[in-house]
Amino acid sequence: MKKKILVTYNLFREGFNEATDDFEFIFPTEKSFDKSEIITKISDCDALLSMFNLPIDKEIIDAGKNLKIISNFGVGFNNIDIAYAQKKGIVVTNTPDPVIEPTAELAFTLMSDLSRRVSECNRKLQYKEPIKWGVMENLGTGLYNKTLGILGMGRIGQAVARRAIAAGMHIIYHNRHRLSESIEEKYKATYVSFDELLKQSDYISIHTPLDESTYHLMDEKALNQTKEGVFIINTARGAVIDEKALVYQLEKGHIGGVGSDVFEKEPEIEEGLLKRDNVVIVPHIGTATIEARNAMSRYAVKNIMLFFEGKDVLSRVI
């Protein structure tokens, strides 16, 4: 009998081409299933392929009477009640590998955009807002010879570092655990304390997971410690930064600019981040490339296939 897989979002089918005939995938006909539809359809499904922004709570898990694995589409898994899934004996997997390059690409794009005021100038020209032309107008700042502080030097952080090295930047980083000498040498990266990273960085790029220890890690106290004029880039999770404190520091001119793909209460955005020339924000598009979406699907499907073959999955959360 085929294993039934409930897919909560209407993804490209290309990412499912490698699945064998042992699996039956149930896709929504519209954009996505809502919670009530998932609860109705999951009762006889063996696996759930869920989205990183869809809460998988106790009610959904209980409705999956045959559920054995939740394969999350995305690297983050704070959308899933992990403790309850574990209690029910359900395996949870994620897709860390395919998100590395597109997320790092976007982080570096936001950094470059802010530095050279690209979005600001583009908007003013397109919408015929007042803008001056001239040799001493619209001055930005270059990345070359600046210090980039990477907060969370995992695989995405390292991919950002690779791009920053090519731009001639100096890399410092802070992790819970220091990296090996060989990795530090590869990226010419220097390990520093959290406080030192705040004080030394011209740019801070955030790549930490969101958990109890990182919630509002960048709070009022931390933001006060940053270098005057620092640019802060967040492609991790919105709640790593206290957005109200961030807006305050922007308004008083301490922070030079913010580039963010993520927000505390998505899709709501703190009002003070809107309509500011030194803020570039995008709607959680860190992995939003055609190539990445197909790669994430393949990875999520592979996790399911390996699980039911009795083999080690590619990336297991619990």
Image (cartoon, helix red, strand yellow):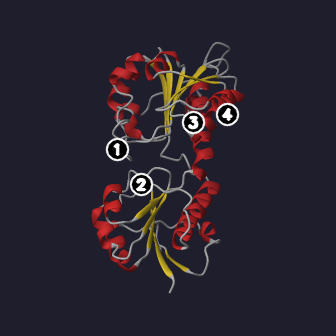
Label 4 secondary element? helix
**Which three-letter amino acid code belongs to the residue tagged 4?**
Arg
Q: Position of residue 133 (x, y in %)?
A: 64, 19
**Which three-letter amino acid code belongs to the residue tagged 2?**
Asn
Mark 1 against mark 3, which lies toward the viewer? 3
Res 237 seen here: yes
Q: Residues within 10 Å of mark 4 (few under 14, many from 20)?
A: some
Q: Which mark is residue 157?
A: 3
- Residue at image mark 1: 265
Measured Cα–Cα span from mark 1 to mark 4: 31 Å
Q: Earlier in the sequence, mark 1 or mark 3?
A: 3
Q: Earlier in the sequence, mark 3 or mark 4?
A: 3
Label 2 secondary element? loop
Q: Position of residue 285 (x, y in %)?
A: 53, 47
Which residue is found at the position 52% from the left and 73% from the top? 308
Q: Which mark is residue 162?
A: 4
Measured Cα–Cα span from mark 1 to mark 2: 12 Å
Which residue is found at the position 37% from the left and 42% from the top? 211
Q: Which mark is residue 53?
A: 2
Q: In the visual, does 77 lie left or right of 171?
A: left
**Which three-letter amino acid code belongs to the residue tagged 1?**
Lys
